[in-house]
Amino acid sequence: MGCAVLSSRKQYTLFSYDGLTLRFRTSYRLEHYTKLIEWDAGYIVVMAKYENIPEVEEYIDLIPVLKDLYMDENAFLRNIQEVRIQYD
């Protein structure tokens, strides 16, 4: 059972697990994710800091991203038990 990593770089959100990184566009004003609130099998609730506004609650649904990539979302998500925010 594993831990996935959520981060961002410029206008992209990055979600990494088991050697695979999903990268998808987000607002160019996103500075960084600050706190993970909830992980629910593909649905993420996270606090995010955007340029010129206070920290806000953000929602990320990975299911449509995985489907757009023709990936089996159940197979990819089933072993993820935890998600952490990490920046290098």
Image (tube, grey):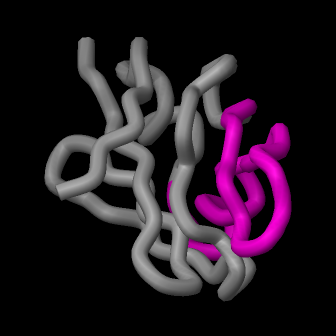
> Which stretch is magenta?
44-71
* Residue drawn at the location 38% of the way across and 29% of the way down: 84
Location of residue 3 in the rendering, given as x and y in whole percent from the top left corner? 29, 24
Q: How many marks?
A: 0
Q: Compared with residue 15, is residue 34 higher up or lower down, i.e. above or below? A: above
Location of residue 41 in the rendering, given as x and y in whole percent from the top left corner? 62, 24
Quarter of the image for the N terminus: give it.
top left
Q: Is residue 24 left or right of residue 19?
A: right
Is 58 included in the stretch rendered in magenta? yes
Quarter of the image for the C terminus: give it.
bottom left
| Residue nearest the observer in this picture, 14 or 70 | 14
* Residue drawn at the location 69% of the way across and 38% of the way down: 47
Q: Is residue 9 left or right of residue 74?
A: left
Location of residue 53 in the rendering, given as x and y in whole percent from the top left corner? 84, 62
Name which quarter of the figure residue 5 lies in: top left
Name which quarter of the figure residue 51 lies in: bottom right
* Residue drawn at the location 57% of the way across and 76% of the way down: 24
Name which quarter of the figure residue 82 lies in: top left
* Residue drawn at the location 57% of the way across and 27% of the way down: 36
Q: Is residue 31 left or right of residue 2?
A: right
Q: Compared with residue 24, is residue 77 higher up or lower down, i.e. above or below? A: above
Q: Compared with residue 70, is residue 57 higher up or lower down, i.e. above or below? A: above
| Residue nearest the observer in this picture, 67 or 56 | 56
Location of residue 14 in the rendering, given as x and y in whole percent from the top left corner? 43, 63
Q: Compared with residue 85, is residue 68 higher up or lower down, i.e. above or below? A: below
